[in-house]
Amino acid sequence: MPGPGTTSVHGPDDGERRSGPVNTPVERATTYRFENTDALVDASHAGRGFYTRYGHANFEPVEARFAALHGAEGAVLFASGMAAVAAVVQAFCRAGDRVAVMADVYGGTRALLDHMVERGELVLDVVPFDALDALEERLHGTRVFFAETPTNPSLRLVDVPRVAAACKATETLLVVDGTFAGPTQLRPLPLGADLVLESATKQLAGHSDVMGGLLAGSAEHVAALANARRLYGAVPDPETAWLIERGMKTLDVRARRQAETAGRVARWLDGHDAVLEVRYPGLEVHPQHALLERLGAGPGAMLSFRVTGGGDGARRVIDALELIANAPSLGGVESLASLPRFTSHAHLTPEERTALGVTDDLVRLSVGLEDADDLIDDLDRALRAPAT
Ligand SMILES: *Cc1c(COP(=O)(O)O)cnc(C)c1O
């Protein structure tokens, strides 16, 4: 089995392409012509080279890479991460089904599930992080459990094997959103998850220029998801899929370098007198540092830290950054900082934010590919910025 670097560049070696262009050509066709009707019927069943909403030659290299990196039988590419979240419900839930979700999930995931509850489509159980230890009792009769690790922006880790055991015992489908880690840093499927979900918009494509979403799992689950994509139509454009494929070729090397830099920045921040607390799973002081090793996971490129001076202090720091952009999103080649209370968690009340560890003095940082020393210089200057 080739390593993650080789798989990122080449995809799984299926022996299919031994000659021709080194890159997948962009196939700008929505429909295909056939010698005869038998050939047309075969193509329609195969879901390729027929009509783009059924599957496309530029989706396949992305899906094959994602599946191989995650050790899955297959994967399905969607137009966005949110389209992938929606597809789980479209493929596996019936009207009125009970769904459970971690309280710490991505804001968009929670908003979509709340929306479905309002429309009477689902019944939702929101599970606080501390309740994950006693999950089995509350999962009875639940169709799907949406987990996410590491969490945003608290960088808490989910004990995936433990959650998977509770899901297995209650026949609940476990979906793990691993966007914050990526497939080279965390593989939830061998740990017991049924499906792994990632927003390709973030580190997979990695250049803050395209949107996409992916789900990987068993062949049976993948077939149901591909059917949902065909029915609901959340397909990307071939050009977009091509850009995701190109981004994925450098995924492993980017993820390694970003994690290494994030480690250096986190250790530096940890010693700074204007920093109250640093949350980064790779730091020995992280309360779940041992779990990271048990999961066989890498520390990732995301960290968050609390600064002195409360909400005003955090605002001052982020506004004083010059190299690091004040922007939402994550996983790109450029480092991005944000104040979660104004971005991912703006829709929550201050009490709800506090319960999730999202205090006003918290700064989230997505570490890019710049040199660690330059990021540290920028942070050092910003942390010294005087109050005006
Ligand atoms: C961004 C994100 C999503 C949604 O993905 P989009 O591509 O923006 O639709 C889902 N989960 C997590 C953890 C994310 O960061």
Image (cartoon, grey):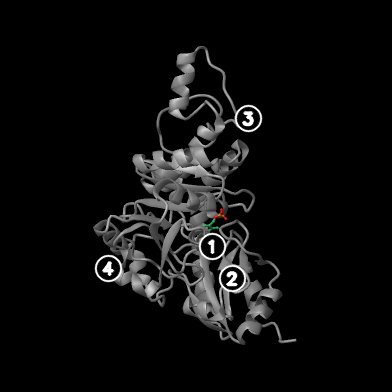
Provide the residue designation for mark 2: 347
Provide the residue designation for mark 1: 111
- Residue 293 in percent (x, y) is at 34, 65
Provide the residue designation for mark 4: 137
Of the two numbered discs 3 and 1 on the same chain, state the one appearing first in sequence: 3
- Residue 252 in percent (x, y) is at 48, 51
Of the two numbered discs 4 and 2 on the same chain, state the one appearing first in sequence: 4
Q: CA distance from mark 1 to mark 2?
A: 9 Å
Q: Is residue 263 left or right of residue 195?
A: right
Label 3 SS: loop
Label 1 SS: helix
Instruction: State which image quarter holds ligand 1.
Output: bottom right
Pointers 4 and 1 in contact (C-beta within 8 Å): no
Of the two numbered discs 1 and 2 on the same chain, state the one appearing first in sequence: 1
Identify the residue at image location x=34%, y=68%.
291
- Residue 158 in percent (x, y) is at 37, 66
The amino acid pointed to by label 3 is Arg
Give neighbour class at mark 1: few <14, some 14-19, many 20+ (Cα, 10 Å): few
Label 2 SS: loop
- Residue farthest to the top? 36
Q: CA distance from mark 3 to mark 1?
A: 34 Å
Provide the residue designation for mark 3: 28
Mark number displayed over residue 81: none
Residue 145 appears in the figure: no
Q: Is residue 259 left or right of residue 31?
A: left
* Mark 2: C-beta under 8 Å from nearest atom of ligand 1: no
